[in-house]
Image (spheres, rainbow, N blue to C red):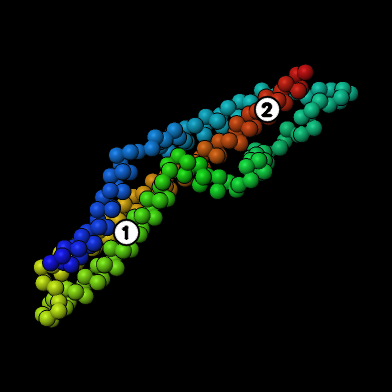
Amino acid sequence: MKVSSMHRFCRRLPALLLLAVSCSAFLFPIPSRIPTSSAQVLHATKKSKQTFSELGNTVPPPPPPTSTPPPFATSTDETSFEEEEMEAEEENTAVTGLSPTMYDKLRSEATTPFRSLRLFIYGGIGVGASLGGYTAVTQLVQSLQHRPDALPLSQSILNVGVDFGVAAAAAGAWVFENRLKQVTDKEMQALRAKEPFRLTFDMKKARERALSG
């Protein structure tokens, strides 16, 4: 009797762990300070592009060729925005020592901590429950064959339902969490795409001060 109770407890342990992890993820959410929708990110990007185009139209003319060229005047005004963006990314990589993709992943993990741990737990529970389900299926076959050492038929059916139910719940939680991770990664990429605009804005301001002085 004690062995049977311990066996049932071990089979229901993955379900209890999955329920505890899911409740902790929804009861204690981590506040995010980034835009919550792709529409807000696109609006901010368009606004930055408009600011950049307005700055491009307000650049004063260069000084006469007889005067000494001030700093920042050696760079031509025909430099494309793509080249400036690449230079900004290279400078950011040189400062941080990280590639843009790794930088986005670290920022995403800092915004939503323990997401990788939750994905690992969901995956482990799903794999364990699936293996237990296959074992329960073999026990169910033995019960249907009325073998003397087989479990009761009702107990075998309950074991199959519990194991595959936990596996399905873990798979659903993993898919849901992974979709949230993809949304966060896209938001981080959109934020990184706006950084060259801000850097170009600072460069334009410095160039204006150099030309006016």
Spatial CA span between label 2 and label 1: 54 Å
Front residue of 107/80: it is 107
Q: Specify the farthest residue to the front.
A: 2
Q: Does residue 201 appear left or right of residue 159 in this picture?
A: right
**Hey, what amino acid is under mark 1?**
Ile
Residue 168 at x, y percent in the picture = 26, 59
Disc 1 target residue: 125
Residue with the mark numbered 2: 204
Closer to us: mark 2 or mark 1?
Answer: 1
Location of residue 86 with respect to 52 vertically, above or below: below
Callouts 2 and 1 close, C-beta under 8 Å: no
Does 64 sit above or below residue 23? above
Q: Residue 155 at x, y = what percent?
A: 13, 67
Q: Position of residue 175 (x, y in %)?
A: 35, 53
Asked where in the image residue 139 lies, by quadrant, the reply is bottom left
Q: Report the residue at 10% width, 68% height from top.
A: 154
Q: Quadrant of the C terminus?
A: top right
Q: Looking at the rendering, which quadrant does residue 196 occupy?
A: top right
In the rendered structure, which disc, 2 or 1, sits on the residue that comes first in sequence? 1
Mark 1 Cα-neighbour bin, 10 Å: few <14, some 14–19, many ≥20:
many
Left or right: residue 120 versus residue 85 is left
In this rendering, the answer to whether 52 lies above or below 175 is: above
- Tell me the residue at 36%/55% (across/down): 121
Task: Assess disc 2: are there few (<14), some (14-19) or many (≥20) residues with their C-alpha within 10 Å of its C-alpha.
Answer: some
Where on the picture, by quarter, is residue 79?
A: top right
Q: Is residue 164 above or below residue 189?
A: below
At label 2, the amino acid type is Lys
Disc number placed over residue 198 in the picture, else none: none
